[in-house]
Amino acid sequence: MSASQTGGCLCGAVRFELAEAPTEYGACHCTMCRKFSGGIELGLHVPPGGVTWTGEENIGRYQSSEWAERGFCKICGSSLFWHLTAPGPMQGMFSLSAGALDSFDGLEFATEVYIDMKPASHAFAGNRKRMTEAEVMEMVNAGPEGQA
């Protein structure tokens, strides 16, 4: 990562600044992300403390599992993030909706997760890291209950 990056929701009521600009993003194929985003969720990982919000009072939060929540703009409904709340080494990590960035310039498509839930009609060109649901659960130390 390098210098900061900004973004926000569709109506502008929620804005954010990342402490460091991301260099890559990934795709999630899980059912919850598809429902939350209206398709394949493209996201970028931000460590705890790596994002500063403006208009935070306009963020709605939905606890989508025992170990994670999702955030959206209460005014326009834009999907903003997935946030890991479970204790463990990755607690507090955000996956910000990549589409909320002001610019996609310089970002590399690097990862696909929940690849075992990918609809058969979806296929991205190129090689990247791909992880199954079980591999993701182990990585975030979320236990066996599944999607977040």
Image (cartoon, rainbow, N blue to C red):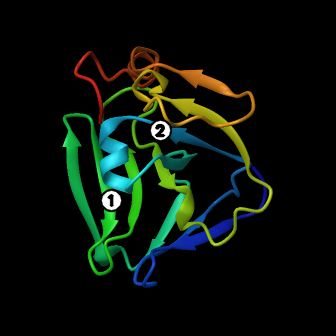
Using the image, determine if residue 124 lies above or below residue 69.
Answer: above
- The structure residue drawn at horizontal position 55% and vertical position 62%, both measured from the top left corner, is 99
Pinpoint residue 48: horizontal percent, then vertical percent.
Answer: 49, 47
**Left or right, residue 58 beside residue 108:** left
Please give the residue where the numbered disc 1 appears in the rendered image.
71
Q: Of tags 1 and 2, which is closer to the observer?
A: 2
Residue lying furthest front in this view? 121
Residue 31 found in image quarter: top left
From the top left corner, tell me how far across and down residue 130 is, in percent: 59, 23
Q: Nearer the viewer, residue 4 or 49?
A: 4
Identified at 49% across, 25% down, the residue is 115
Placement of 79 over or under 43, stated as above or below: below
Give the residue type at disc 1: Gly
Element at label 1: strand
The residue that appears at 19% across and 34% down in the rendered structure is: 66
- Report whether 80 appears left or right of 147: right
Q: Check disc 2 and report the residue beneath it.
A: 28
